[in-house]
Amino acid sequence: MASLCATAISLLVLGMLPAASSEASLRVHAAMGKEEPHPPPEPTVPDMPKKEDDGAFKDKSTACLACKYAATGSCAMYKTCICYATNSFFEVMGVPSPTDTSNWHWACGNEGGDKYELCHSVNEHYEDNFGDKIDPNKPKCP
């Protein structure tokens, strides 16, 4: 019972202390020169590939380029995305075959199942997740 009372008193005392302001904390980091602004990187693909009229990409390589465009223009995606692509056309028994059987889409992972195929085979020591050469002394997204 005594330890419960001591804990309650400690929490009350901590609750009465003034809270550190996040603005003051940010100013301290800025004044110490620890924080450097990092603008988002330029995508390594010049333009986002166009989708076909049906809203999908025409082939696997185009879907993979779209993934690379999106993922290399954002540090969060650059560090976490591994591009996969899948053809969302599946044959259905008893239904006539459509003329368009190439409906490719991309994703940052293969959690959708074995129909997703890896876009870029890379050497992890010298290339990033998208097959681009990297310089470990000058990272694209520090």
Image (spheres, grey):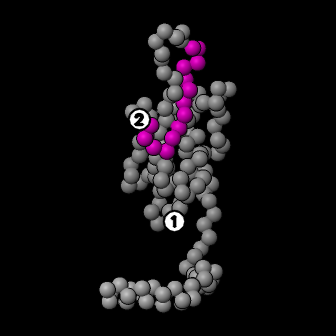
Say which mark, if any, is on residue 113: 2
N-term mark: 1 or 2: 2
Say which mark, if any, is on residue 142: 1
- Tell me which amino acid carries mark 1: Pro
State yes or no: residue 93 in magenta: no
- Relative depth, front residue between 125 and 54: 54
Residue at the limit of the structure toward the right, as seen here: 53
Instruction: Tell me which corner region of the image, top left, top right, bottom left or bottom right, holds residue 68.
Output: top right
Q: Which residue is depicted at the point 57% across and 14% down?
A: 98
Residue 20, visible in the rendered structure: yes
Judged left or right of residue 37, residue 109 is: left
Q: Which residue is depicted at the point 49% across and 45% down?
A: 108
Judged left or right of residue 92, residue 49 is: right
Relative vertical location of residue 31 with respect to residue 36 in this rendering, above or below: below
Count of marks, rendered view: 2
How packed is label 1: few (under 14 Cα within 10 Å), some, or many (20 or more)? few
